[in-house]
Amino acid sequence: MPKVVDQTQIFNAVIELLIKKGYAGTTTKEIAQVAGINEVTLFRRYHSKAQLVIQAVENLANHEMMGDSIQFTGDLEA
């Protein structure tokens, strides 16, 4: 049975390394190592380093920074 890959663990590794090393200094090999997965898994799932970083940052913005404090209601005045 294949190992279940925790997307949150991957995204946390991406953000951690970006903070420490910046985009250019962070490699997919390092991300995989910190996340505890194989580098091939990253490319199968995200196709590129850029796409992985985009999704990690979007996840951070949607879940970590905003939390449940902002709810979409459709009411622009609210």
Image (cartoon, rainbow, N blue to C red):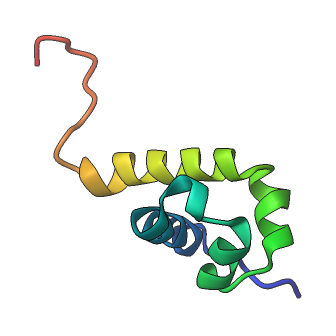
**Residue 67 in sight from this viewpoint:** no
In the rendering, at what x and y percent does residue 26 appear?
59, 65
In the rendering, at what x and y percent does residue 73 appear?
25, 25
Q: Residue at x 42, y 70 (%)?
A: 20
Query: In the visual, does 1 lie left or right of 42?
Result: right
**Residue 48 in sight from this viewpoint:** yes
Q: Residue at x 52, y 69 (%)?
A: 8
Query: Which sits in the foreground, 44 or 75?
Result: 44
Occupied quadrant, residue 75 = top left
Query: Which sits in the foreground, 59 or 77?
Result: 59
In the rendering, at what x and y percent does residue 19 appear?
39, 64
Q: Residue at x 28, y 29 (%)?
A: 72
In the rendering, at what x and y percent does residue 31 appear?
63, 72
Q: Residue at x 45, y 63 (%)?
A: 15
> Split into 4 quadrants, where in the image is the C terminus?
top left
Query: In the visual, does 61 lie left or right of 38?
Result: left
Query: In the visual, does 11 lie left or right of 2?
Result: left
Query: Which sits in the foreground, 11 or 22?
Result: 22
Above or below residue 56? Residue 4 is: below
Residue found farthest to the left: 78
Above or below residue 66? Residue 32 is: below
> Split into 4 quadrants, where in the image is the N terminus?
bottom right
Query: In the visual, does 60 lie left or right of 74?
Result: right
Above or below residue 34? Residue 12 is: above
